[in-house]
Amino acid sequence: MSVGSWRACLRIARRDALRAKGRSALIVAMIAIPVLGMSAADVTWRSAQLDPDELISRTLGQADARVRDTAREHGALIPGQLPTPIRQDPEGNDWQTVPLEAASPPSGSPPSGAGSGGAASTGTPAADPVSVIPGITETLTDRSAYATVSTAYGRGGVSVHEFDYTKPLAKGMVIQRGGRAPVARDEVVVTRRLARSAGYRVGGQLTESSTGRAYRIVGTVDLPQDLRAITVFALPGALIDALPSGSPASGSIEPETATLIRVSGGLPWNRVLEANRHGLLVRSAAVLRHPPARSELSSWTPRQWADSHALRLGGIGVGLGLLEMILLAGPAFAVGARRRRRELGLIGVAGGSRRHIGGVVLGGGLVLGAVGALLGTSLGLAVAALTRSWFAERTGRLLGHYDVRPLELLGIGGVGVAIGVLAALIPAWLAAREDVAASLTGRRGVRRGSRLLPIAGTTGVALGAAIAMYGADRADETIIVVGVVVAELGLVACCPALIGLTARLGRFLPLSARLALRDAARSRPRSAPAMAAVMAAVAGSVAVAVVWTSQTADERHAYRPNALTNHVLVGVHDRDTFPGRPAGAPVTAGQMEAVRSAVERTLPRAKGGSLGSLTGPCTPDRSECAGYRVRKLPRFRCPIEDGGDPARWHADPRCVFSSPGNGFFRSVVGDADTLRKLTGADDPRAAEVLARGGIVLFEDGYIGPDGTAEVTAYRNGAGAGGMSAMEKPDPARPVVRLPAVTVRAPFGLGGGIFASPAAAATLGATPEPVGAVYDAGRSPSDAQKQRLEESLARISDRTFLFVERGFQGRDDVRLLLLAVFALVITIGASGVATGLALADGRRDLATLGAVGAPPGVRRRLSAFQSGVIAFLGTVLGLVVGVLAGVVVRRGQRAALWDTLPPAIQARLHAPTVVVPWSRLALALVVLPLLAGLLAALLTRSRAVLRGRTA
């Protein structure tokens, strides 16, 4: 057509849009809502991606680097340990130790500055971690430790930072929200999160529990990168030095120290690598601004998996979202074409060609698509601005500057316009094929379905699935999206045939259902797009649900609890908990009875009792105590244990490190009732073995054919030999064989031992109270926990409290939001199909009324029309969604898992695919039911008589 013809078509389309405001508003909303979501998501995502200067300001202030001495931190834990070279990521977040011989200086790196003394190469720890970096002109120290402080409800643990954030070097790292910064040593500020949970207010008082020193709270602050921080800020020398060295209240052996430095010439990547050789972890402003090339990095990138997961999930979501927009708006344009049949017929009578008729409908898509894109983009910008604080609360960090990318928003708007045109394409084609005489008289012809379309659709499904699997194996999210979209388009092509097959079941159904199925089959051009729109909405939600459920299952598998869920542990600080500390006097039975009273007073429903440790005897000064471990059978034993080559550790699956299931109690003495309370194991075999003076284990590979296990003794102390002195075999104590059994419990002690009192006596152990475990029935509140900590502190400063809340999965809220999204889209698409069915079926309804059908038939007919579309679309959506979810998980495995050496795979949990079948079955029932009920409620049961058209 000519340009003039297109102008005429657009004028007619604009006039019709203004005339039919309700229908136009519906189409605009269908286009604007997805555009709104994508625009808001784009601006929010870009705002969350901090530019280097913003990230530097939040984490480094105005410094050139932040340096942390990992060697010194480990040296504080294990006296005499030499600094160990490390390997870090460019951001300075993740690091791991590396062998000394692997830490050769990078080519072109400058030598260490004066004062380093070759610390890493000579094995002499550096006196000052900053001394190995030459050219430092200014420093600012951030010392941190754990402390117990008073709260409005009792007491609780906090992170204490002695850090003068008012210095120019720290500008941007801390945001003052209320009050002022501390100016004296008896003043502190707290984070707003701590103030809310502990009941603090500006002008109030905070007391450090171990020293009793009081501090005045003069302000509240936020950490822009961690809004959930439970932190107290004080001036240097105000609080940490007063903590008793090595006391439980201090929370750590020695405070951690990070230093902000300003360096002449900055700290590029090669100088960071040089600092890594001295055990220094460095976050450098120069590296954040100019990251090293991929070739300069090691293959150790633990965040690669998460990044590829986010990209893959986001790409599939965008691909399905665009397809959904087309399918959802298509039926709405079909409604308009049906309503305008007579008007379009008049265009043909007036001399317009089929192209002109199709151009008018297509012009409507262009006009309404442009309006929807403009409206959606504008509202998206507003939503992104209004939800910044909400996103900050949800993510725990402030967004960056309001980052608007005009080209990206223009592209999103262009997609909205294109969606409007594409959605109107098929209705325009059908309108152009319409017989002019039939359009003027209102009669409808009979269209037979294409036999090639189902074949093409089935081929598309198979081809799309193959493409998606190929993309998953290559970890390419673009190929995955293409494959999923091709498969979904194949199912779209199969929709008319599926509707026709379903209609054959109508003869077995009541009148209203039979009429609904017949009408859906007869009007496939408007039923199939609506059904496909429901499929797209459900498929996207199901795909994300499968991925999140699978990821949650992996996280749940990796989670290591410290007790049964909703159980409260009261532990006693000892050498096993904090090696190298003075042992102190053991906790007495009277103190444990006081602990029981405090727990039952604070938590009335709590039930439990004290636990004894399998330890002793100890030296008179308690500087060294005997400990016990079970020896693995030879065929399960790591070669290193028998003096083998340590290089085999990476290749031999027997050397897989087994993380204990309990971080506090590795070896416990008790009876079968104590075993049940602690681990949840109610196994008659365990009770029988304990009664015979045996032990209970929780891992395989320890018990021989005769039903016994070897228990060896070791000396646990803080000698001058470092780790070797902390746990070394005790040749004076023989190996003892004891009856043993392995049980599977809801919570186990990992490689630890649960011994009977008789077994402890056989070993010569002298059990001491090591803590207590109580079933609280439900998770205690923050106030209850703080009150209990206050009560325990009065009993002994060596007790600590831990509440096991279980694995805290975060998928429930997300899946709920996805379910609501799928519900809204399903009901909307079903409503469009129902509205079109009512518009097309007015004559049929009038005929039903004329022959005496009751008024309720009209309402039931609408319900079944909507329910049928929703049900068929939901079924197909479940199929596509599960396929997409499986493909994404397969891509995750290919992205990282399949690239790992077998020995590393043996130490990790392979990604699994978990399909939430129960939730999917619920969606299959609830979505069609709600769609049908709403259609019935919104339909008038009384029909309006219509005149005949000549």
Image (cartoon, rainbow, N blue to C red):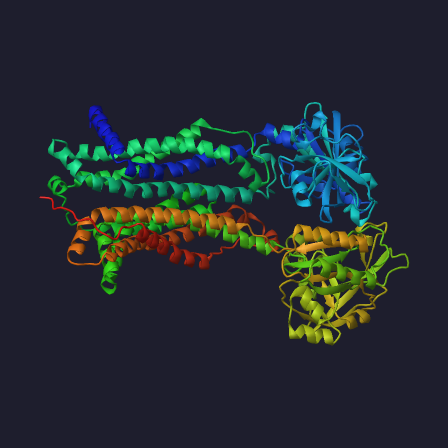
In the displayed structure, does residue 304 sit left or right of residue 98?
left
Question: Residue at (32%, 39%) from the top-left corner?
Answer: 26
Q: Is residue 517 visible?
A: no
Q: Quadrant of residue 18?
A: top left
In front: 469, or 383?
383
Question: Residue at (79%, 52%) from the top-left corner?
Answer: 793
Q: Position of residue 758 (x, y in %)?
A: 78, 73
In the displayed structure, does residue 405 sit left or right of residue 284?
left
In front: 812, or 451?
812
Q: Is residue 499 visible?
A: yes
Q: Position of residue 2 (x, y in %)?
A: 20, 25
Q: Position of residue 680 (x, y in %)?
A: 64, 66
Relative height, residue 305 to residue 40 (above, below):
below
Q: Quadrant of residue 482?
A: top left
Residue farthest along the left direction in this orientation: 950
Q: Quadrant of the C terminus?
A: top left
Residue farthest along the right direction in this orientation: 620
Question: Residue at (63%, 30%) from the top-left corner?
Answer: 56
Q: Quadrant of the N terminus?
A: top left
Q: Quadrant of residue 160?
A: top right
Relative height, residue 613 to residue 724 (above, below):
below
